[in-house]
Image (cartoon, helix red, strand yellow):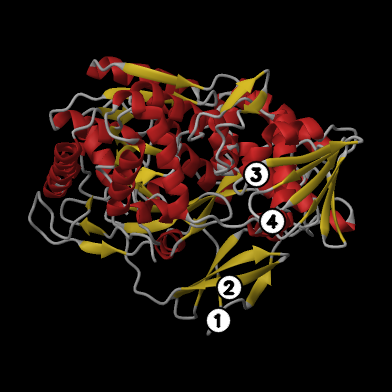
Amino acid sequence: MKAMRAPLWWCHTCNVPLREPQCSKCGGRGSEVILTDPGDVRPAFEGDLRFIYEALDYEFSDAGIGNLLGIGSIGVYLNKVPFIDDMKEVIVGGVVVGRLYFDIASMRWRWRLSEASTRILVDYGRISYVVRDGVKPLEIVGQCEVEGEQIPVVDPGGRLVALAVCRKGVYRVQKLFRRELRYPTLSPRPTLKDLAKANEYHIRRLTSVASSKIYSIWEKVRKPLVASYSGGKDSLVSLDICLRAGFEPRLLFNDTGLELPETLRNVEEVSKRYSLVLDYVSSGERFWESLGTFGPPARDYRWCCKVVKLAAIARYYRENYRDGALVIIGQRAYESLSRFRSGYLWRNKWLPSVLNLSPIQQWDQLTEWLYILENKLPYNYLYEEGFDRLGCYLCPAANIAEYCLIEKLHPDLWSRWYSKLTEWQRVVGQPYEWVRYHLWRWLRKDSPGRRRIYSYLGIPEVMEGTPSDRESPLRGSRLGLTVKFTDGSYIVESEGLDLVEPVISQRTTIGLVRTVNKEEGVVVLEGPGKAGAGRVLLSKNKAVVSGKDSEDLAYGIVKLVTRWYKCTACGNCSYWCPNGAITISQGRPLTDQRRCSSCRVCLEVCPLTSVYVDRVERYKLGHLFRPKKRSETRFVLELYRALAARTMSSRKETSTQYELDGLKFFLELI
């Protein structure tokens, strides 16, 4: 399945971009602008223009080139495209005049010429060129010294035919120019009013559709309305449309403890502007308190979401909306393939009690900004500085360009994170590049993202650790557990840790329902059914697991011991237990074995067992375990059972009936 594509047209009469072929201002038909997918264009702000001028000055030592390209004199628009870090197509006057990209080798913004900008610079004599006839891709056309330097190639007749780039001391042809060149339209100079008028029909149509979605869904479910506000443009537009539709939701802000000060100020400003009740959900210092246990988060190791987001939000909805709610969320299909697939109406499997609605699912960034600027909405100042996305300032999904910008704006916040990264670099024996190029953003050492960075920089991949550990993620603080498979049995051993207390106190969680014998320091535990289903001989520092479910039980023991000694008291297990059998006491999970039904929901929601053990400890144990994928439908059933158990005090229906009604509604939505 392909993600959405937003086509862009340009009205050369009004000199403005269009989201539909016909201009609402002059009635003329625009010409399509060829962009890289998904074409999610946005206006360039003051910070973006600074980056562009910085890049042009570094690349060509000529600040006047920006004026030749029309940058600063008329509207400039950016289209983010795939790259090793951050790259944006720069559109001026209906033409892509170049690509602005962040070079991680020099840690600065640079400029890559397009066909249009190359032609302009050649015509105005602002750049030297070479003359060649019949060049081919990757052909060497000269010697060079500055890595990344660009030089146009023209044929003997003076026609621009290619662009060559300096790579390892030689100019190689990187791009052939085959299409007829179009120069950017530099006049007339449009105003914001002209831009809004030209796209008036498009904005009105999408606004009407978004308002209708909110009203029609609310009519069906009749649940309290909550607007989830993050401090970003998407949630701001969604909130404003909800208010214009005649609703007055409560405003919910999840403060992860990793938000930038400008975002916190914007949340306060928006709540006052609209006179809405603001509910804060805060995780305080929980991320920093858990960092020593998990290590830095990564794109393939997002323990932080469960620790600072899931637990706090789940607790909020449990305490305030036991019968469910309709939540307005600023989500757009252009952001990612997963968000495109979710549609405008969905339920989060971790929060099935609430129904999420994204009224701007089909909106692109240009439409959003036209709506924001036309209606003078109080948007976050960070967009003016050049941010594309807002959220946790140390999110592993961010680009290095964003980290550099955060370091410049808030050196105190970045210094705290940088000191933690350097500590972990020493602890796990990583090279200098691990921090310098933010390789901590990937857990696995063989991750494609990490390999692409090494390839881009032209340096050999650094393989840390011992030969047997090269493919293993080095993250988190080890417990010292070892697992061996001998004579058909799994043997779990510890280095100085008592296994008896954590396993005995949580045994029913993994299905060890019977204590058969206790003698001479050995406890014999068995699972349900026949004796061969699973049997554990448990002593102080050793557990011998046999039977047909031995692999599952041994892996379960590793998880029980891990969460017993490393519990971060996030509360997920306690909240989601269908039978209310788990409580957190003195930083450890206590299980009421008379009420536990061995559903393992607690192991699914615990960041230690479902993220840390599955992603880190499993590899350290030598790939002995193969985690089984659970049925999504069965898991949703168990979550609804947990929800039903938590809402019986406010409902007359039986737990079973409520569970089935909820599941039916969930399946209808997906």
Which disc is residue 135 wearing?
A: 1
Residue at left offset 10%, top offset 59%: 28
Query: Which is more foreground, mark 4 or mark 1?
Result: 4
Q: Are marks 4 and 1 in contact (CB under 8 Å)?
A: no
Q: Amino acid at mark 1?
A: Val
Query: Which is more foreground, mark 3 or mark 2?
Result: 3
Give coordinates of residue 540: x percent, y percent: 87, 35
Of the numbered discs 4 and 3, the one sitting upstream in the chain is: 3
User: Which of 12 and 293 lies nearest the eye of the viewer?
Assistant: 293
Q: Are marks 3 and 1 in contact (CB under 8 Å)?
A: no
Q: Amino acid at mark 3?
A: Ile
Of the numbered discs 4 and 2, the one sitting upstream in the chain is: 2
Quarter of the image for residue 293 reads top right
Q: Secondary structure at mark 1?
A: loop
Residue at left offset 78%, top offset 47%: 536
Q: Amino acid at mark 2?
A: Val
Query: Which is more foreground, mark 4 or mark 3?
Result: 4
Residue at left offset 48%, top offset 33%: 391
The residue tagged 2 is 173
Which disc is residue 533 wearing?
A: 4
User: What is the crowding at mark 3: few (fewer than 14 residues within 10 Å), some, or many (at least 20)?
Assistant: many
Q: Secondary structure at mark 3?
A: helix
Marks 4 and 1, Cα distance to the nearest angstrom? 71 Å
The residue tagged 3 is 510
Marks 3 and 1, Cα distance to the nearest angstrom? 67 Å
